[in-house]
Amino acid sequence: MNTVTLTVNGRETSVPAGASILEAARTLDIAIPTLCFHKELSTLGSCWMCIVELKGKNRFVPACSTTVTPGMDVETDNGQLRLMRTRTVERLLEQHCGDCEAPCSTACPAGCNIPAYTGAIRRGDDSTAIRIITETIPLAATLGRICPAPCEDACRRHGVDEPVAICSLKRFAADRNHNAPQPYIPVKAEPSGKKVAVIGAGPAGLSTAYYLLQDGHDVTVYDANSRPGGMMYYAIPRFRLPENVLKADIAPVAAMGGNMVTGMELGKDMSPDELKQKGYDAIFLAIGAGKAADPGIPGQHLSGIMSGIAFLKSVATGNSPDPGKDVIVVGGGNTAVDAARTALRLGARNVTLLYRRTREEMPANRVEIGEAEAEGISLKLLSAPVSVSERNGRLELVVQDMKPGEPDESGRRRPVPVEGSVGRLEADTIITAIGQQVDASLTGLLHIETTPKGTITIDPESFQTSNPWIFAGGDCVTGAGIAVTAVGQGRKAAAAISRYLNGEPPSGTTRPFNSSYGERDHAPRALYRQALPLKRISMHELTGAERITSFSEVCSGLTEEQARQEASRCLRCSCNTKNDCTLRELATHYEAELVPDPQEAHENDYIVRNGSIRFERDKCIDCGICTRTIQETRNGDIETTILTERCPTGALS
């Protein structure tokens, strides 16, 4: 047999005459990226991804279709080749249009695989649904009730009628799991011999513990309060989140062997040095941002004035105050709305929510604002507190009318006073809920770096603080936010801590490239034409009169029939082959930045051949593998799986 000797990346090899450069490189276990190449098909070299450099000749050739010659000196990877391959990937992406990840998943701060679990519910496979959900969201029943659902805002179903009820479906799967004879508990890895202390039993701390336990670590969760759950327990009313639901969500932590120690306050009952002496290998700080911000007005410390956090916590612990007849709540966030709705249930007749911006700028959940209004709570918008005084046993609040001014750092228009427009309101109780912050007394004890806003400084990839064995996440890092963001931070922090404990760099892995149709309503019309209009299913709710007389849960959840129907509304815009897509792998590896203009997307409908293959023209990059497979297979008799598995972009599925 005639052989040819050549050099690849400085290493000599001999291959049969007529072999390609690609084949020669593989004899040395040198990988060259390919896209249009398939070992069972004729080569084209059309995609230009496998380009290599012929040293000394200043030539670049495709490795898959270039035959080796004696003495050839080949280089497969250098700065110039990487740049050329990056440009090639970006050129191919200009032809490719589609969502790798569904917009709902990318909008979810926890990165939940929403199309996968809605698909499982649609099929009636609820056990698979809960396993998919808890891969990223362990507190599923809780978040199914309290999450403001940024995923639903991003849902492409808006282009047909209404978004899918994603949170209601998450709640359905979680409630079914809690009521099952044997609720799902994740499988644990072998014991690692490492110990981690989690400080704070809120959403970030509990999530971190959940995933660290799965990795085989010994985990103890410490919390200053008498009950775990953090603000989910102490600041969210029972009519939104029943205690037994939160308890069931937390149960897997103990079931996996986690220790829960309550009534232990950082700085008073323990310190990082003491935890290190007890043998802990890492600490995760999830101390939240539970300190209420002061309104900063004269008279703010008068009797009858309390923070929203203090008010809700007193109710949660069974020490409900008598709010009197007239209540004013200052603020526009979830805490303010929850406090207002709670005051109503404690017997207040007139509850007013005072907010200095417009209704559209209120940070509270849209649904909760509507619920508050439906229950009879009044909104006094574009109005700010100026001072408060006591008169005849009542509180008198001086308020200033406001108007929208220039945008501030948040992008919202800054409220500015309207001259000469001061009014007075009387109340028995005033509840202030204008924001929450990290307790500076706690961060000061830790001797770690903080930001000017008082939040803990971390490396965003490793979650490490300025003290490398101390990690942090959740509201104490981001500032007061929503629970699903804290849950997402907890999961990522757990992965970083595990890497650290295993002696690996704690920084995260590369985020996969994500192709997208673009803005929510910019997908090709073909995507929407496949869907029949189908009304969104709403959960049963108590009537207004039924609500305000008790703390019973307002919404009762979807029935099984409703859940299956609602799940069927999902457009399934996530790519079925996103985790096995050569184009995506190459775009990630070469850090492609180009995102196709959604206005240039093809408008062809999905084409179904033989009732088994779906062809999406938007995703096709004309690599030719499918046509060559058909042409080069005898009699054209091809199994569906051969075509779909060979497609490198998910255009065939």
Image (tube, rainbow, N blue to C red):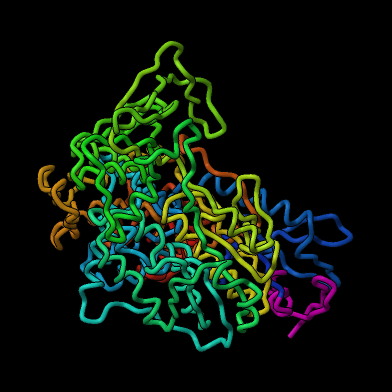
Q: Quadrant of the N terminus?
A: bottom right
Rendered location of residue 450, percent (x, y): 65, 53
Rendered location of residue 486, percent (x, y): 47, 58
Assess whether residue 25 is covered by the magenta stretch.
yes
Q: Quadrant of the C terminus?
A: bottom left
In the depicted structure, whether residue 432 falls above or below residue 287 = above
Please identify the residue farthest to the right as the structure is shown: 56
Q: How many marks?
A: 0
Rendered location of residue 522, percent (x, y): 40, 37
**Is residue 366 in view from this perspective?**
yes
**Is residue 572 in view from this perspective?**
no
In the depicted structure, whether residue 321 falls above or below residue 127 = above
Q: Is residue 584 left or right of residue 375?
A: right
Q: Quadrant of residue 371?
A: top left
Of 652 and 467, nearer the camera is 467
Assess whether residue 408 is covered by the magenta stretch.
no
Q: Is residue 584 left or right of residue 553?
A: right
Rendered residue at 74%/76% (across/down) = 17
Rendered residue at 66%/62% (across/down) = 465
Rendered location of residue 177, percent (x, y): 25, 72
Please identify the residue farthest to the front as the structure is shown: 392
Of 453 and 22, nearer the camera is 453
Q: Is residue 112 left or right of residue 320?
A: right
Query: Range of the magenta residues?
Result: 1-29
Of 106 and 466, nearer the camera is 466
Q: Quadrant of residue 274?
A: bottom right
Please identify the residue farthest to the top as the structure is shown: 420
